[in-house]
Image (cartoon, rainbow, N blue to C red):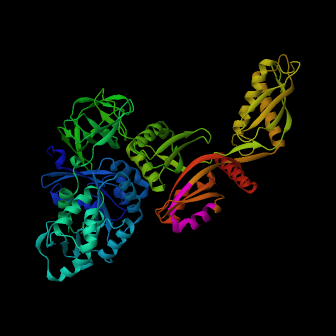
Amino acid sequence: MKTYEPSAIRNVLLVGHGGTGKTTLAEALLFASGATTRMGSVEEGNTVTDFEPEETKKQISVSLALAPFEWKDAKVNLLDAPGYADFIGDVTGAIRAADAVLFVVSAVDGVEVQHEVVWELVAEAGLPRAIFINKIDRERASFERTLEGLVRAFGTQVAPLQFPIGEEHDFEGIADLLGHKAYRYPSGPQGAESDWPDDIAGKAEPHREKLAEAVAEADDSLLEQYLETGELSEEQIISGVRAGLKDARIAPVLVGSASKLMGVDRLANFIVNGFPSPADRPPVKVMTKEGEEEERASDPEGPLTAFVFKTISDPYVGRISLFRVLSGKLRPDITIWNATAGHEERIHQIFTMRGKDHENVGEVPAGDIAAVAKLAHTTTGDTLTMKGDDVTLPAVQWPEPLFAVAVEPKTQGDEDKLSTALARIGEEDPTIQIARRADINQTVMNGMGEAHIDVMVERMHRKFGVEVKTEPAKVPYKETIRAPAEALGRHVKQTGGHGQYAVAHLRVEPTGSGGGFEFVKEIVGGVIPSQFIPSVEKGVVAAMERGVLAGYPVVDVRVTVDDGKHHPVDSSDMAFQMAGSLAFREAAEKAGMVLLEPIVDVEVLVPETMTGDIMGDLNQKRGKVLGMDPTGTGKTNIRAQVPQAEMVRYSIDLRSITGGHGMYTMTFSHYEEVPAHITDRVVAELKAQQEEAHK
């Protein structure tokens, strides 16, 4: 593939809800352009962009894929993004690499949840967007119904440029509202052009009115004329569509059937003629090391500035970094500077990718997308420059992963490779977070949902040969005491020769929530020699870490050692540790142990019509609703405090209650005492687990 100037490049992100036919549309565009010689299918598992084994097995996209093709003297870098909520991280990264976004909507199912979620992300980024209504040839397909749903969801900026000639089994072609031409597809992806048939002129009028309204609302000068005369000229509509699309004030609607290759050529023409090139987009803002803001235009002669938006861990090639050059040029066999990580990187071969296939390139100019392998210090979100040019792009705001599972190796062999595999998976996907949690003695993997975690586990096995078991991450309960108490700890053993002798008397009392641990020495007369006092404290701390009630750490306790006995020969460090531990356990049991649970601050953003269902569910989860804040966009932000134990599967519960329309965030707040009946259940579950482990 030859090198293209920024003005001849189109970087297009393909998005939509799962099952709308995005991957089939990508396949159709590749085939229609001649980039491939056959058209694969999702069902047969042989498409270009769904090449990961997890994708062919599940028949869904789970990872972002690049698929460049050439059309009419332009290069189109198509980015096929996953359509399921669990894989929204790839969409977030790709938005930073794209200049325009194409939403694929099924004419059967209409607007779905993920369309709305991604639309908000794209609107926030200010990217131009268009809509392709797919599957118009399927049973129950309706262009009118789908168009009405789009206007309801996204407003009057939705503007039809085409409408179908026939629907379902009678779908035979496309009517172009701007050119007054019809395109039929007797064979292959190339439409046969003809004038509008007489019978569709009447059908076109309502769609032309919608188009004129959208153009007028996007331009104040045209709006005045439209309100006065009720119409706009063809020239005004055409120029208005172009200007409105460039400024993201109009979202044109096209139509077709990707699987039948109908309308695909018209879509490719629209991408090249309608979507902006990198040269048309505003300069990007970068931040210097001194904290000053600069702008960088998409100029091949400018200073090198590139952004890594996707990392792929390949077991054979190593780490592959997909990047977009925003300014300057990137060539092979040079040393560059990772301004984010503060490290030099050696660039060897540079290549473009079409799915999993690589093709080496001689240079990557501003505006283009390519890949490089084996960068040692570079991960997703990093800025690449030349040494001495310490500028960085704004950090990507990745969605917060809230679904947590504990992972452990299945075998001893897996244990040795696990940490490496987890690190590589984390590099590949920033919405996966790995942490070793000492408080629950587990390695916890946080992801976007069950499907996300399942795919990561499969990927670790396939790429790195590591098999793991997963289970819900434990809740980090803690224990404390209710009242003061005291006890005597005796560790006395006489078995001939050196014995063991230590006696320690302890008082325990609560220090209150957040009071922490205090150890107080009130020994008088040397009944416990000073060198053994730290040993008593060690024993107390060890007993606190092991827990008394249910095996969870004891907190917020003051322990005072005020008496004891020793033996000039048989007393030792270990003996006093044992005495301290025994005394603490007995005193704590007398004091009355209680279980503490973490409480989290939760914010749930849902459509206003669902607030009652969400509040009822939070109340069932022992939550306290603190308030509701309407956003002014038809949604409400519900603030609550909920026990963390009740939130373990909340991502699944919320998706079920809201049909995927809800989002939430969760942060730790404080600890509270667990109700008695729940304490009994937690203790019983822990004992059952311990018995199972000892079998």
Residue at x 80%, y 29% (from the top left corner)? 579
Name the residue furthest top. Answer: 568
**Residue at image x 23%, y 29%?**
334
* Residue farthest along the bottom direction in this orientation: 199
The image quarter containing residue 542 is: top right
Q: Is residue 610 magenta?
A: yes
Q: In the image shown, does 179 or 585 lie closer to the viewer?
A: 179
**Principal secondary structure, stretch drawn in magenta:** helix
Q: Splitting the image into 4 quarters, where does residue 147 fall?
A: bottom left
Indicate yes or no whether the magenta region holds residue 481: no
Looking at the image, residue 644 sits to the left or right of residue 213; the answer is: right
| 301 with respect to 151 (left or right) | left
Measuring from the top left, give residue 322's x and y in whole percent. 30, 43
Q: Tell me if residue 38 can be seen.
A: no
Percent of width and height locating residue 277 = 21, 50
In this rendering, is residue 483 above or below 347? below
Coordinates of residue 173 in the picture (x, y in percent):
19, 73
In the rendered view, tell whether residue 524 sits above or below residue 265: above
Q: Is residue 639 visible?
A: yes
Q: In terms of depth relative to the viewer, which is nearer, 381 or 100?
A: 100
367, 490: nearer the viewer: 367
In magenta, the rendered stretch is 603-618
128 with respect to 642 (left or right)? left
Image spot of residue 145 (x, y percent): 34, 75
Task: Please name the residue shown 85% across and 23% down the image.
Answer: 523
